[in-house]
Image (cartoon, rainbow, N blue to C red):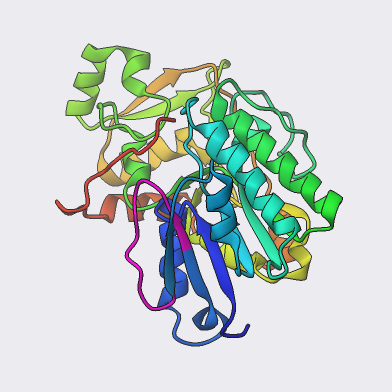
Amino acid sequence: MTARRRILVTGATGKVGQAFVRRVLAADDGPLAELTVRALCHNRVLEPGPRLEVVRGSLAEREVAEEAIDGVTHVLHLATTKETPETIMDVAVKGLFWLLEAYATSATVEQFLLMGGDASVGHFFYPRDTPLTETDPHRAYPGCYALSKVREEVMAEQYGIQYNLNVCCRRAPWIMEKDDCRYQLSFGDDVFGGPRWRDLVGPERADAYFAEGAVPVMLDEHGRPVKRNFVHVEDLVDAILAALDNPAARRETFNICMDEPVDYGTLGAYLAATRGAPTVEIPTTYHSVWLDNTKAKLALGWRPQYDLERLVEDAWAYERHADNPRIVWYPG
């Protein structure tokens, strides 16, 4: 890389964006040290600094997308608004369209990295007999977020074909950091993500479970613990960096996840053994799914560093300070 390398990061204030920007700016030698970040910010804003430029605005506006992409060599597109029907198509779909339109006529952009998600292939909403690979068809579940992920992935793929663009999609499941894993198991109103366990068992039972520190064991329709895919944000950033300027990533999609999905039965047993947490079996309509990451390991040389034990231990060891409250910016 040369000093003129510049990467546009949309969604730069989100979980993945902040981790990626932090990793790049922390580098003081090697290729990353020669990379400048241009952060596109909307509601939340980063402070500009050495090797960090800031552009403000909404991707729903073509002029914003064109200004943001002007003169960059790489694009990392992370921006979304989750289950927010009023804005998600403007940001995730129209915004991506404006960025790809600008890329198609750009004299400087060399690579476009899209953040996809397992929402585009149905997550745990549909039964599966085999592991999910990158060749499985798109299959959105109910809601606007999954639909937006399908449309993003298809649009990026087709622009790659139409204009011979260097696009790459990393398809991630639920992204964990800090104490996320701990709070996704909470029976309280502080639960992170879904399902909302208290809605499944009722407020009285939920309050009792919360008071005793119980953890849910999600069961499928046959009464078996559900297996669900996760990835730690640092492993995801590793995968993004592994795809950066990698010829093997050109016009490819990669599943980026832990080597094995988290089995809620195994998770409950581990927390019972290590923390003395009682477990509560919760029947649901969800299904086990195994996202296969073999392609990324083979083509990119990437390896996840997190397994179930490390995910749990990091989450329970994390101490959240008063100036770092848990905030859910978007539903879903």
Residue under the point 77% across and 69% down: 247
**Can the viewer see residue 64?**
yes
The quarter of the displayed image where residue 207 is located: top left
Residue under the point 59% across and 30% down: 146
Q: Relative to residue 31, is residue 179 depicted above or below?
A: above
Q: Main secondary structure of the magenta part?
A: loop
Where residue 110 appears, x then y in whole percent? Answer: 71, 68
Q: Relative to residue 143, is residue 191 depicted above or below?
A: below
**Can the viewer see residue 170?**
no
Q: Is residue 186 left or right of residue 195?
A: left
Where residue 182 appears, x then y in whole percent? Answer: 32, 42
The quarter of the displayed image where residue 244 is located: bottom right
Where residue 26 appears, x then y in whole percent? Answer: 41, 76
Residue farthest to the front?
A: 63
Nearer to us in this view, 134 or 13 = 13
Indicate yes or no whether the magenta region holds residue 121.
no
- Segment colored magenta: 39-51
Residue under the point 31% across and 48% down: 179
Residue farthest to the bottom?
A: 29
Residue under the point 53% across and 83% down: 34
